[in-house]
Image (spheres, rainbow, N blue to C red):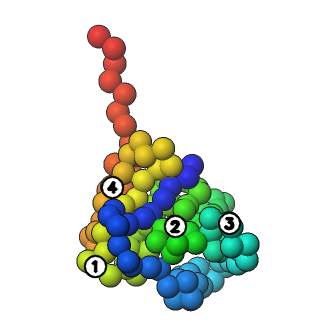
Amino acid sequence: MEYLITPIEETDWRINELDLINHLSEKWSNVQIKEITNLDDFYCFEGLINLSGNDKTLEFALHRDRQGVSLDGYLENCALFAVWLRSLVPQDQKLAFYDQGYNAHIELNQNTTELEIINSFISTVLPLV
């Protein structure tokens, strides 16, 4: 499933592309990153992480405006990435994590946990009476 991380409100803040690539490489030694040179593309680079001890992969892409990241993978892996990315962003920059259809969302702050993200996307189906 696809999830996104973007600012909650309009801002001049931008993700530094080179810093993000360096942090990705430090965190995940097996990260694969591909620069996208077509300026008409929505993304400036995309990548793939094979999570250790896990057959699951996580795809990510930095938006060309450098204000957001798109994620494609299992919710728990996307939540892990979101918490990690939040730790790199200035505390005063408000971010949201949400699914592509904006059916659910959560504000990411410095103390947001993976479990809080996952729980915000779990819906309980109530039995029909």
Q: Nearer the viewer, residue 120 or 54?
A: 120
Q: Is residue 16 left or right of residue 83?
A: right
Q: Secondary structure at mark 2?
A: strand
First reached walking from the N terminus: tag 2 or tag 4: 2
Instruction: For label 1, count other residues whose C-alpha is less than 10 Å away and answer few (under 14), some (14-19) or many (20+).
Output: few
- The residue wearing badge 3 is 41
Discs 3, 2 touching: Cβ within 8 Å: no
Pinpoint residue 56: horizontal percent, then vertical percent: 63, 59
Q: Secondary structure at mark 3?
A: loop
Q: Is residue 70 visible?
A: yes
Q: Residue at x 40, y 59 (%)?
A: 97
Q: Residue at x 44, y 63 (%)?
A: 5
- The residue wearing badge 1 is 91
Q: Is residue 128 above or below residue 2?
A: above
Instruction: For label 3, count other residues whose C-alpha is less than 10 Å away and answer few (under 14), some (14-19) or many (20+).
Output: few
Q: Closer to the observer: label 2 or label 4?
A: 2
Q: CA distance from mark 3 to mark 2?
A: 14 Å
Q: Closer to the observer: label 3 or label 2?
A: 3
Q: Is residue 60 above or below residue 3?
A: below
Q: Secondary structure at mark 4?
A: strand
- The residue wearing badge 2 is 69
Q: Is residue 96 left or right of residue 29?
A: left
First reached walking from the N terminus: tag 1 or tag 2: 2
Discs 1, 3 touching: Cβ within 8 Å: no
Q: What amino acid is at disc 3? A: Asp
The quarter holding residue 129 reads: top left
First reached walking from the N terminus: tag 4 or tag 1: 1
Q: Secondary structure at mark 1?
A: loop
Q: CA distance from mark 1 to mark 2?
A: 17 Å
Q: Is residue 95 visible?
A: no
Instruction: For label 4, count other residues whose C-alpha is less than 10 Å away and answer few (under 14), some (14-19) or many (20+).
Output: some
